[in-house]
Amino acid sequence: MTGAIQEEEPAGWNPEASGTRVRLRDNPGRQGTTTGRVKKAGTFLLVEVDFGPNEKQCKRYELLEPIAEEAQIFDLLEGGSFGGPSDLRRVLTFEKIKGELTNVFYSMEASNTDFYPHQFKPVMRFIESPIGRMLIADEVGLGKTIEATYIWKEIQARHSARRLLIICPAMLREKWREDLRKRFNITGEIVSASTLYERVKDIASYRSAESFVYITSLEGLRPPANYDDESVSGVRAQFARILDQNTASEEFALFDHVVIDEAHYLRNPSTANNRLARLLREASHHLAGC
């Protein structure tokens, strides 16, 4: 190998500069770093590229291109830059290991209940949903509470979810806590609207990674129609404002998952219940009604 070239260098990037990030034109997933070493092979200019641990290869200059910056997917498609089969296999393997593409139910052995196939149908629909929203509308007695909790366990396994909020009529709060404890070994905490507001306010302020399973009443959170008016006081309005001001993003959400029991109370779009559901939908990564 030699670092000298007598002939006129091809127009474009400098192959003798070490540390240049390059990729193969016909296989953009194959990327490496130039070492600064080049040599001639007949009429071809060969550039040494470090593709990784103990893998240095010489590639023809015209088959390489520098990686200037992270390209957007539409720019790559427009430019005809596609990866090869090996790149697709790597991506699929990564997604499979990560759990995004698998149809295995991580939550199947998560409860102290008998196995009923129908209880996993909502889990499958939820996994396949592109929006992370679900309405469980089974008949009374078919275990909607169990199905909703299976979904939570699945989200925990797949996305390392930490924060679950369960909203139900006040008379059902104790039942939810007991079912979570007996059937799933989950310790849920019944909280008032004011306590929930204070804790969520801290999470919003500090972007903390606090974990919790909170159970609270639907009646205590119904926001007034003019909740967005800062002069309107009261916990319901304040809680609604903090939801409105903290829309969920990929990096952060006030709640990883929200379960709303007796969701038929939400169907009228002009009601406070529906208003609350809309705000919670935007402030959480996932939401299920049952």
Image (tube, helix red, strand yellow):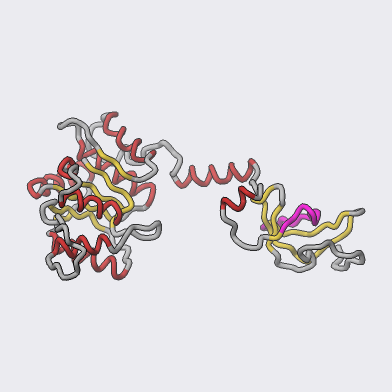
Question: Which residue is farthest left?
Answer: 171
- Residue 52: x and y, percent? 67, 57
- Tell me residue 68's x, y (percent): 65, 63
Q: Which residues are magenta?
A: 52-65
Q: Is residue 263 left or right of residue 252?
A: left
Specify whether residue 239 is in view.
yes
Magenta segment includes 54: yes
Asked if residue 141 is among those painted magenta in the image, a careful observer would answer: no
**Looking at the picture, does residue 260 appear above or below residue 66?**
above
Identify the residue at horizontal 78%, vertical 66% (top origin).
14
Q: Nearer the viewer, residue 221 or 35?
A: 221
Q: Residue at x 70, y 59 (%)?
A: 22
**Main secondary structure along the magenta-highlighted residues:** strand
Query: Number of callouts in the render?
Result: 0
Left or right position of 215 against 6: left
Q: Position of residue 119 (x, y in %)?
A: 27, 33
Quarter-wise, where is residue 183 in the image?
top left
Say which residue appears at 28% left-offset and 66% top-offset.
204
Where does the image place residue 281, in percent across and percent down from the top left? 28, 51
Image quarter where the C terminus lies is top left
Residue extending farthest top: 117
Quadrant into which the N terminus falls: bottom right
Residue at horizontal 14%, vertical 64%? Answer: 235
Vertical side of 284 occupied by 180: above or below: above
Q: Can the viewer see residue 187?
A: no
